Amino acid sequence: MIKLITTHTPFSLLFAEVLVGIFILLIFFTLVFIPWSKIKPSNGIREIVLRVYSWWAISVLVVVMFLVPGDIGTIALGFLTFIALREFITKLSVAKYYRRTLLYIYLTIPIQFYLAKYGSTYSFNTFIPVFMFFLIPTRNIIMGQHKKYLEFNGKIFWALMLVVYGFSQVTYLRHQSDFTNYEGGADLILLLVVFLTQINDVLQFLWGKTLGRHKLSPNISPNKTIEGFVGGALTLGLITYLLASYLPFTSKIEACLFGLGISVFGLLGDLNMSAVKRDLGVKDMDDLIPGHGGLLDRLDSLSFTLPFAVHYLILRGYF
């Protein structure tokens, strides 16, 4: 059964309260960390300042997406997905004889977003993970290409899953979810996932700077510490426990566990993109935002937390 209507508006009281709270926090972190970066500069502080800037940009984009008509918001998100996918693919040094296959790769964006908005849950969740898994190598087999066959197919499929499948979760949640007994609706869930993901980065940094002694993944991200991760996860769990009335869960304990999940997947998304960049031998995925890198550099944690949040809600039967 195809569900096309989101029953809640983004102008609910709950949504307004959360939005005001987020912008108050944004102002607070801006007033704290930007002067801090001037007084006592360091790579860690610089990264947090970049996160704060990206938090501003993402928050504004999210609000704008909620205000514009649904089709325009979907097209805009699809265009941002195209930019992010292009960032990824341009770093892969694709052999000339595989470049024609890239046309089919880019065509997955409009198809996936169409399925996210109008398709069934099955078609949305299988088009890339199942059908594109077979179609990409099939096209190359028909063309008789075998040099770097495994490398190309693996990297392209990973790019599709990370970028296109990951970001299309937003459209799926906004247009195919139908929450019952929850005033906030899909838009508030999305706003909170973005907020929790971004604040998790800041919390892990602060705990790492305060108590960090043991490296979490020194070969991938030397600045990440076990203490920073644990402190950030526990704090985020406490935040979601306190925000339970703004979430659709049946208990505060489940809200707390959801926060712990966001923290874990946020860290994994961050580490994943760091590992990708180290493997590719690049510092940033792009220079779209001077001094800040590309879209994927700013949305690395969300690439994991969005699919986690959506599929957790599906598995628990909340819509």
Image (cartoon, helix red, strand yellow):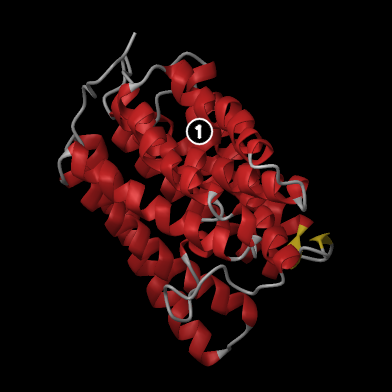
* Residue shown at 25% from the left, 39% from the top: 15
Which residue is disc 1 drawn over? 309
Decide if residue 236 is in sight here. no
Q: Is 217 drawn above or below residue 318 in the view shown?
A: below
Q: Position of residue 210 (x, y in %)?
A: 69, 68
Where does residue 111 sit, x and y in percent of width and height?
38, 34
- State which quadrant residue 285 falls in: bottom right
Looking at the rendering, in which quadrant would you find the N terminus? top left
Residue 188 visible somewhere in the drawing: yes
Locate the C terminus and report the quarter of the image it occupies: top left
> Which of the 4 image quadrants contains residue 131?
top right
Q: Name the residue located 55 percent from the left edge and 64 percent from the top edge.
A: 90
Residue most extreme to the top: 1
Left or right: 35 with respect to 132? left
Q: Is residue 76 left or right of residue 283?
A: left
Task: Please give left or right for residue 238 compared with residue 208 in the image.
Answer: left
46 relative to 120, above or below? below
Taking the spot 76% from the left edge, 46% from the top edge, the residue there is 146
- At horizontal 56% and vertical 55% (from top left) the residue drawn is 99
Name the residue furthest bottom: 39
Type of the residue with mark 1 = Ala
Front residue of 86/277: it is: 86
Q: Specify few, some or many for label 1: CA neighbours under 10 Å numbering under 14, 14-19, or 20 or more.
A: many
Picture quadrant of residue 183: top left
Numbered disc 1: secondary structure: helix
* Residue 150, x across and y down, in percent: 76, 45
Q: How many marks?
A: 1
Q: Position of residue 228 (x, y in %)?
A: 70, 58
Q: In this rendering, would 13 be left or right of 27?
A: left
Picture layout, residue 106 above or below residue 44: above
